[in-house]
Image (tube, rainbow, N blue to C red):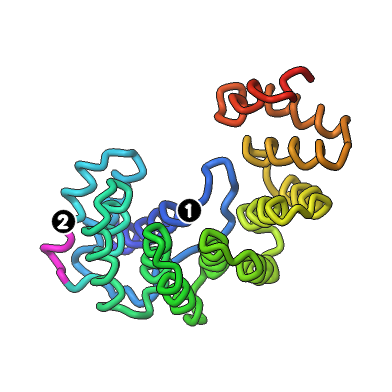
Amino acid sequence: MKKWTLRLLAVWLVMMLVACQSQQIKNDETSSIQGSEKSAADVYVSLGVEYMNRRMNEVALEKLKKAIVVDPFSSNAHNVLAVLYDRLGEKPLAGEHYQKAISLSPKNSSAQNNYARYLCSIKEYDLADEHFNKALKNPLYRSAVVALTNAGTCAWNAGNLEKAETYYRTALQRNKQSAITLLQMAKLKFEMKNYLSVRAYLQRFKDVNQHTPASLWLGIQAEDILGDKNSVASYVLQLRQLYPDSHEMGLLEKSKFNRL
């Protein structure tokens, strides 16, 4: 396979890996890593990401370490290695390589977004927000909707629901069909006890993506509060038929809705 083809594959796979989206939600974002110059490490990065997607993490780690040896100044290689360490629960090592990635290429918006997500996971909310916004300052960043949605979820985790809603709305202004953003907004509106809005966002979600276990369970709860028994029954039936082995099905079986 030609070197440039491997590079494009690596870029695409990395962003599919770190977009923080459920596999049951379609992702129509075309993503790329900004600020990553061509490097002899790119072949090893692409191989590492491919093995990560196959859940062959030990082999992936070997390839990505090799990428760093070949080119210790590759922001892309440090970014992807950090993602792998994060996946493996090696938080200090993940943080070290995220910091290296952004120091080597501050305009690498993928690294800025990934580092911000990492910071949010360790409850460094203000610093995370700063790095989300650094990612978003790059006008060439093709995954701004992903970063905005991640920033909204981080703000929500920090307890700032209004800020979370602002980020989600901005994301939907850029792409009104972003499935993950629509579902997150529906969940947020449930948290805010705005159940009619939950219904509306779930309908928009369904228009662009097949229902997931999470969206069906959310619909069951919202429609129950709204008093629409037919919609509750419809959601229950879909959850049983489509996702009989899901976590949400387990919740259903322990709830009052199991009688429907």
> Around disc 2, counting alpha carbons within 10 Å, would you say few (fewer than 14), some (14 to 19), or many (20 or more)?
many
> Which is nearer the N-term, disc 1 or disc 2?
1
Tell which residue pokes out farthest to the top in this image. Answer: 259
Cα–Cα gap, marks 1 and 2? 24 Å
Q: Which secondary structure dominates the residues rendered in magenta?
A: helix
Tell me where the magenta segment starts and ends, as one range. Answer: 66-72
Q: Amino acid at mark 1?
A: Cys
Q: Residue at x 73, y 24 (%)?
A: 256
Q: Using the image, determine if residue 63 lies above or below residue 58.
A: below
Question: Residue 191 placed where, x, y %?
Answer: 68, 52
Tell me which amino acid carries mark 2. Answer: Lys
Q: Which residue is mark 1?
A: 20
Helix, strand or loop at label 1? It is loop
Residue at 29 percent across and 52 percent down: it is: 84
* Residue identified by numbered label 2: 65
Residue 47, can we see it?
no
Left or right of 141: which side holds 38? left
Residue 222's x, y, as percent?
A: 77, 42
Instruction: Tell me which residue sits at (39%, 71%) in the image.
Output: 112
